Image (cartoon, rainbow, N blue to C red):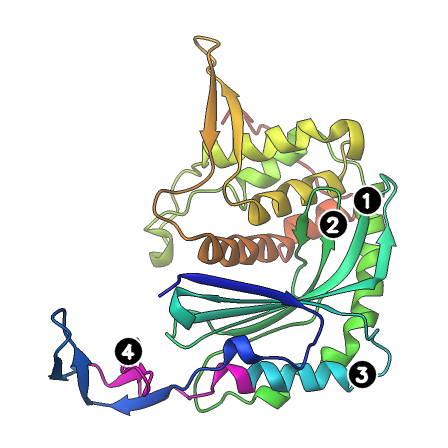
Amino acid sequence: MQDTITRTHDNIMDVSLFEMPIKKAVNPKIILDNESGEPTQTTMNDNVVVYRPDTMEILGRSRSNKYKIIEPAILFQKHAEKVMSDKNLPRNIEVTDSIYEGGRKQKRTLAFPDLTHVMPDNSKVNMRSDIFNSVDMSWMYQAFAGAYRDLCRNSLVFGGQRMYHVKQKHTTGLNVNATLNQVTKTIQMFNENKELMDKMINQEISLEQVAYILAQNIAKKKSGLSRFGIQQKVEVNKKLMDYFLYQFDREKGNLGSTVWNLFNALTHWSTHIDDTFERENEKTGEITEISMTRAGSKTHTAQVKREDKVREFMNTEDWQNMLAGVFVIPKGVNLQF
């Protein structure tokens, strides 16, 4: 079965790509096809198995029997109906539907080309919304309002406290209608973030401040002992740090030494999963091309994880202080990472 299928169209009510029957079985005995093609009956040890009744293909397993079945087409249709109920939203909508891993994961992107903010570098930022779902229990149902910058093809993600963002597990508490209540506030939120982007453009930041805030947050290596409250010396993901500083330095001529430049370096990383950059060996002077792709990683999964990390970073106190122009590097800090 094809791993990824993507379709772009202009009919938001067309959810045909997401149509697939799914069922849940608790402590089931399921008829499965073995390698020889002959059916065989297998007892599953998991409490819950989600499967396709038409093909008997297992989509996901869980130890919890609280998983709530919602067929993807129904979920995306409810979202589409909510969007269309907002008379203030433009009817000109570019829809990109994607299914991954044989339908186990789904994504819909809505772009609104009539809602545009022109930046000082003449790039255009269009409003967009991304909706994620899965039937294999790997992704929660999630919906984000964000933007798209045409000049560098960046998907712009924003902190959840400013942009519409819902994230719900597929449990008995999942109420799709309740999670969509903020859809009609999309234009208001886009306008608020036009102001946020303008603020980023006007807020200058030094390279030293960029390096320090990255080292303390998104480029910081997480210690396995931190969950036990044991503090260790801060270690930095040097490859990630070098990549962000490379992107920041490369765009200084266009975007300046600004928070907007740093934000675009972050969203470039979360958008362009297969990106590379050149790094110089400090001892030999040799230039090496470095890949930012982890071997065996899937693009759609990596993008979701990276975008979540950017949102998390934008919700930190450090980011807010930087945006307000009050971020200060503590005295005595050695920035040699």
Mark found first going from the N terminus, 2 or 1: 1
Mark found first going from the N terminus, 4 or 3: 4
Measure the alpha-carbon separation of dots 4 and 3: 38 Å
Measure the alpha-carbon separation of dots 4 and 1: 46 Å
Magenta span has 228? no
Mark found first going from the N terminus, 4 or 1: 4
The label shown at residue 45 is none
Does residue 22 appear left or right of residue 16 in this picture? left
Name the residue beneath numbered marker 3.
86
The label shown at residue 149 is 2
Does residue 35 appear left or right of residue 19 in this picture? left
Which of these two is toward me, 57 or 324?
57
Measure the alpha-carbon separation of dots 2 and 3: 24 Å
Mark found first going from the N terminus, 1 or 3: 3
Is residue 181 something that shows in the picture?
no
Measure the alpha-carbon separation of dots 2 and 1: 7 Å
Amino acid type indicated by mark 3: Asp
Tags 2 and 1 touching, CB below 8 Å: yes
Mark found first going from the N terminus, 2 or 3: 3
The label shown at residue 123 is 1
Name the residue beneath numbered marker 4.
57
